[in-house]
Image: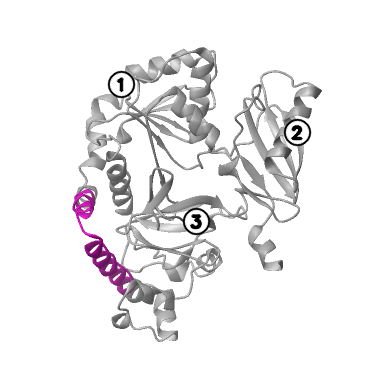
Amino acid sequence: MKKPFSKTIRNKLIKNKEFLNTYSELTVYDLMSEEEKNKLQFELLKQTLIHAYDHTKYYHELFDKLEIKIEDVNSVADLKRIPILTKDILKERWDDLQSDDIDDFYLVTTGGTSGEPIKVNMEKNAIYREWAFVYHYWSKFGYDFKTTKLATFRGINLGNKIYEINPLYAEVRLNVFALNENNFGQYIEIIDRFGADIIYGYPSAIYNFCRIANKKGINLKERFKMVLLISENLYAFQEEMIKQVINCEIAMFYGHSERAVFGEKYGKTYLFNSLYGITEIGKKNEPIVTGFINRKTPLIRYLIDDQVIPTDTGYEVVGHHSSEVLVGSNDERVTMASINFHDDTFKKIKAYQFVQKDIGRCILRLESEKKLSSVDMYNIKNNVERKLGKGFICIPEQVDAVGISKRGKYKMLISEINILENEGRN
């Protein structure tokens, strides 16, 4: 039923005035000098502070209490006078953080580290600004929002269906939960029939698609212009498989549901787009962000529980402190990004996942199409412990399937170790 109206539906996004204006601003932004970019960012900061003071109870009270006068804010560095906004404060003062002059908005929720959802009200136009940033970044790798079609692999619940067409985003959504070796040919046929020229989605889902293609000896090297990855960390073993099978550029950006930071990945590191907001790096390498695109729930110096490491070329995004780092008995730290095996350790393994509940000890869940022998388990244990170092004991166990979230997201490590609390005790 949607097919005759697909162009009309798509135009609701790509011909939206807010989308086009933001995309145009980003095109001009690319041509600016660093000095001009910094000046523009500061102007946007001032506008954000003025609006938050005038229209939210929380910031009005806070600025008055600290005697912060916006006219005295002369540089981005002056932002440090404002206390950090934590997720606890966001929950406690949620009503007081809502702007009273914006009536057209929608609610966004995201999972908190404790499992309790974080809520943010998003003004309607923020979604159009967001997609302008995404499409503008993707355009540097060959994406054209007027013509490109996507083959999308995300954790969307399609029930018994293998696919559905979503004309708003010019994509065919493929059921990642149903994909297997027997129906792989159907997926290829659907992608070709739709005319998708770019593959898009979770790294774990696209990795699995490439793993099956590699196993079946199906050549995908000329089918896609690029791979667009979202929402999960990209691990070395996944990147190797995707590049081996599809052999094209990979684009990936860093952001979060609250929409206060946008990091664009170039090579191995990220650059934060200063038109989207301001990103400070805290003492423990945690991002502290101030967003520009959503005025309904202003987030000024909002603390994100991720870890960002400055480098010579940009920033390395390590991920959440407690979910992306194994902790050894002698306080060793092994990031999931560094886990890679170039030998035959996981030759028989379809997927694997670390689980850590105690420091220095981890369970390694192994998903395999065939039962693993005691020799297999012994070799895997030895090889993994050698890779991790003396501070770790690894207990391998075979499972029917490694754990994924309700949205189909995969994490290489599920950890109950709170690194920040640990550091506080040391």
Q: At which x and y percent is residue 156?
A: 48, 34
Question: Judging from the image, what secondary structure is the residue with disc 1 in?
Answer: loop
In the foreground, 294 or 206:
206
Q: Nearer the viewer, residue 115 or 409?
A: 409
Asked if the residue under mark 1 is in contact with the one under mark 3, i.e. CB atoms within 8 Å, the reply is no
Q: CA distance from mark 2 to mark 1?
A: 45 Å
Which residue is denoted by mark 2 in the rendering?
A: 381
Element at badge 2? helix
Q: Residue 164 falls in which quadrant of the image?
A: top left
Sequence order check: which comes first, mark 3 or mark 1? 1
- Give the mark nearer the N terminus: 2 vs 3: 3
Q: What residue is pinned by disc 3?
A: 309
Q: Is residue 213 above or below residue 354?
A: above
**Marks 2 and 1 close (CB-CB < 8 Å):** no
Check the image and report above or below for 10 versus 61.
above
Name the residue at 40% across, 67% down.
98
